[in-house]
Amino acid sequence: MKTRSISGLSFVFVLLFSSSWSASAQNHEDFLQCLSLHSQNSTSISQVIYTPNNSSYLPILQFSIQNLRFTSSDTPKPSVIVTPLHESQIPTVIKCSRTHGMQIRIRSGGHDYEGLSYVSELPFVILDMINFKSITVDTETSTAWVQSGSTIGELYYRIAEKSKVLGFPAGVCPTVGVGGHFSGGGYGLMLRKYGLAADNVIDARLINVNGEIIDRKSMGEDLFWAIRGGGGASFGVILEWKIKLLSVPQDVTVFTVDKTLEQNATNLVHKWQSIASKFPEDLFIRIIITRVNSTRAGEQTIQASFNSLFLGGQDRLLSLMQESFPELGLAKEECTEMSWIESVLYFAGFPRGESLEVLLDRTPLVRLYFKAKSDYVKEPISKNGLEGIWKMFYEDEAEAAEVILSPYGGKMDEISEYAIPFPHRAGNLYKIQHLVYWEEEGEVAAERHISWIRRLYSYMAPYVSKFPRAAYINYRDLDVGVNKQGNTSYAQASIWGTKYFKNNFNRLVKVKTMVDPGNFFRNEQSIPPISLWRKKKGD
């Protein structure tokens, strides 16, 4: 009975989709039949399948989409969305996708900057891990198991439930899913103290291309190395991570000091470049560059916001700042002591006193259209170079743009660039995230703003890393290179691969060849297996 019901769903699906999809309609129908036939419980699997004729299809598809660029009517949509409730349902999805020529896009929190976790030009299925959000915290061993559909906010909340002196060095945005965040490295405000999220992953469980559930011991150290920074979606479906929890003090100190150009911002940013990576590892000060209204009526100016987390009390912080960065003029009244979990809310933009329960809300605080890029800086940018950035921020398209400068040094200098696939370690003063947001719908507005950030990126070329010009995979940017549809070549992938991974790229290719030689788990920026590009070379 369930088989006939699912077949009916796919018949309606064929009617609704455009002619460009009709040629593959049989594949979709066969895929749904396959799910029903090969599932241990056909009733159970039917409850987590959504096709376009289902009233829940669009709400489920759009709930986790963070970037409005990928919500238009002409954005490719999945043939099927599967939201598994149990890990036993996932091998069947993999098997049926392989058998019937459907790509799988694995979605954790939906924060992929280019939408690769839920968009594909080829017929595809979304495996939405939203129901995989169990978190088990063990304070005795200072560890936790975190399912890949959990958000960073949920993880922080569960840690705080059990301990006031344990934390984890993951990101700032609470709705980011840990599945993609950890597998791309995972940057946060404690990276100078403890490194990346991925540096503190000690085990993992995933389902490979053969549908087998494996952990660190059974997958081997090469694959375990690859999924911690190499982009887990290239290698399988990550079910959960085991992480090492880390000590935080009872009280931390935060501050945000805003300085405009009229308040010496250019000189302060220039000075910060030379000292921020050398501060004690307990101190993290980033800079957020924006355009704001000036105190002069009708005029605008550039503002540099010095945004800081210090793992200690304000008296020690003030002494340290007076010694290391007196030019900022940090005053006691600008500092606030709070618990580490309260600082999580502070950096996420919530007001003081907000309930911790907001960390459990997966609904995005705001959805906008945006485009992002990233860079690494090894030598301080000259004042003239900074002033060129400020000049671009006065352009119309930069009304809601920002540039975020995040310091390295500390623990990041101590960890080898080969320890995990994340190579951006010693030698980097800071990382840049370039962002431009807009609210207008349509291709014209999108092209105008994307053109602006591309021009900013071109302007930055003389001032940032070279050979390769490095980038951070979790700030996904298809402008740095893409795989061709279908099976890609090593030469194509190495264009973007060396920017994200540098000398680790070849090892990632070897791991991919070992675990997924047929290149089933793939997208526009996934690691290719050696077997494919050797065939193209005639080897």
Image (spheres, rainbow, N blue to C red):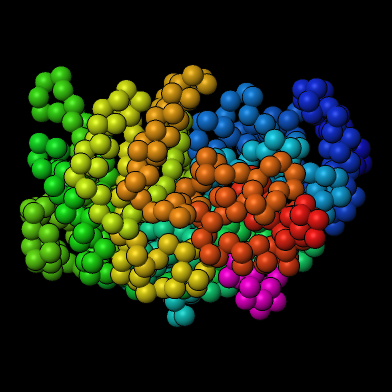
Secondary structure character of the magenta stretch overall: helix
Judging depth in this view, the residue of 507 and 231 nearest the camera is 507
Which stretch appears magenta?
214-228
Judging depth in this view, the residue of 473 and 98 nearest the camera is 473
Task: Indicate the position of residue 222 as horizontal and vertical percent values.
Answer: 63, 73
Instruction: State whether residue 131 appears in this view.
Output: no
Image-based side of 373 in relation to 343, left or right: right
Q: Residue at x 18, y 26 (%)?
A: 300
Image-based side of 368 in relation to 210, left or right: left
Quarter placement of the C terminus: bottom right
Figure check: 399 above or below 501: above
Task: Indicate the position of residue 282 as horizontal and vertical percent values.
Answer: 25, 68
Task: Indicate the position of residue 163 as horizontal and vertical percent values.
Answer: 37, 70
| The magenta stretch spans residue 183 | no
Q: Residue at x 9, y 40 (%)?
A: 263
Which residue, as the protein is rendered here, is positioned at the far front? 538
Quarter placement of the N terminus: top right
